[in-house]
Amino acid sequence: KIVDGEKLRKKLHNTILELKGNIRVFCRVRPLLSNESGAVSYPNNGENIGRGVELMHNTQAYSFAFDKVFDHSASQEDVFTEISQLVQSALDGYKVCIFAYGQTGSGKTHTMMGNPEFNDQKGLIPRSLEQIFETSQSLMSQGWKYKMQASMLEIYNETIRDLLAASRTSIQDGAASKYNIKHDSNGNTQVSDLTIVDVRSINEVSSLLKRAAQSRSVGKTQMNEESSRSHCVFTLRIFGVNEGTDQQVQGVLNLIDLAGSERLNKSGVTGDRLKETQAINKSLSSLSDVIFSIAKKEEHIPFRNSKLTYLLQPCLGGDSKTLMFVNLSPEVSSTSESICSLRFAARVNSCEIGVPRRQTQMRSLSQG
Ligand code: ADP
Ligand code: MG
């Protein structure tokens, strides 16, 4: 619980500096569900938060290390505790992106949204918002006034859909002319026609999240579970003014539930499904390409290769902060997908943006 925002901010200052401009990768293995059997064991030294992931596949051992690894017993609160500073830094004017990457069913939505109705099952989005509101209120005594604006959209087949629109735009008229992405002179992303909601209290946020969840689940039945085939981007813009000192801050918090990363069995996939998969592969690989180009300080960063990277352009690189969760399912049948996810994560994790940091994190025993 945050008691005094200013105190906390001072205490966290060093840690935040360390995070500045860096990419962090956290891994989370969900528990086996009641209808599943055959769990892979992910040894974690008896702690629910460790650093290593090891798994066996076809008699080969695979071993990875990340900034943090949460095992099946890590609660939503355990996870949030580890990222709360990062969330906090958006109030200090940083641009923050937190992604959840993994195959469908690995726990991305649980990690990001969870079940906001139950306190212990709330995910990062409701927890982050609660913390931001609490802290911003405690900072009022020091003259800070904050304005917050939220938006929530989905990117499906490279088409944007507004999850907060009063009436749901159907996929047919997900018109190309709507929801154009632009970057204004202040380096902020503007999406034309996108609903932007001023949020002033936790209650307003709750109803907003409910609205978005409804939009998403309507899509689910109508459109063949396509919510797992789309990226969901929640954005909170924070404008802070200190009336005493005239200081101003503008921070952005992006929380992104990525489309399922699973590969389809290529044979026999045609039509819409093929197009869909190609769009997902393209945007997920664009994301890692962008992260890599930034890390290598390349002159040309290929932001424009996908809607997702173009949308997030101002919030990737520079002194922004990025965290990626790699979600894994413990089922034996998911092992090969898990290895793919871990490789993607290891690739992202080997990036250093700006500040030097600890030795390379990956030590894969076997490269295929
Ligand atoms: P994804 O969004 O990656 O497709 P979900 O978040 O929907 O996956 O998770 C799949 C299922 O597993 C859901 O029923 C979810 O409630 C459950 N689940 C995921 N992570 C956890 C967890 N850490 N603890 C308990 N149940 C989980
Ligand atoms: Mg999901």
Image (cartoon, rainbow, N blue to C red):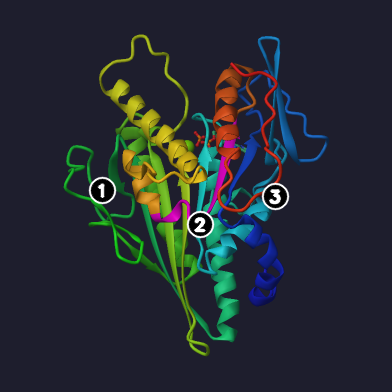
> Foreground: 121 or 85?
85
Examine the rendered structure and indicate whether residue 152 appears above or below residue 88: above
Residue 28: give its label: none
Question: What amino acid is found at the position of numbered circle 1 in the picture?
Answer: Arg
Separation of marks 2 and 3 at Cα, in angstroms = 24 Å
Dot 1: element: loop
Q: Give the percent coordinates (x, y) of residue 347.
A: 56, 33
Q: Residue at x 29, y 25 (%)?
A: 275
Let me know if residue 239 appears in the view. yes
Residue occupied by mark 3: 78
Q: Residue at x 52, y 44 (%)?
A: 295
Question: What amino acid is found at the position of numbered circle 3 in the picture?
Answer: Asp
Question: What amino acid is found at the position of numbered circle 2 in the picture?
Answer: Ser
Q: Residue at x 55, y 74 (%)?
A: 136
Q: Earlier in the sequence, mark 2 or mark 1?
A: 1
Residue occupied by mark 2: 320
Examine the rendered structure and indicate whether residue 139 appears above or below residue 296: below
Query: Horizontally, is 288 left or right of 195 in the view?
Result: right
Highlighted magenta segment, given as a residue range: 314-328
Work out which residue is located at the far front of the displayed protein and give it. 299
Q: Quadrant of residue 53 in the image?
A: top right
Q: Give the percent coordinates (x, y) of residue 297.
A: 48, 46
Residue 168: give its label: 1
Q: Quadrant of the N terminus?
A: bottom right
Dot 3 beta carbon under 8 Å from ligand 1: no
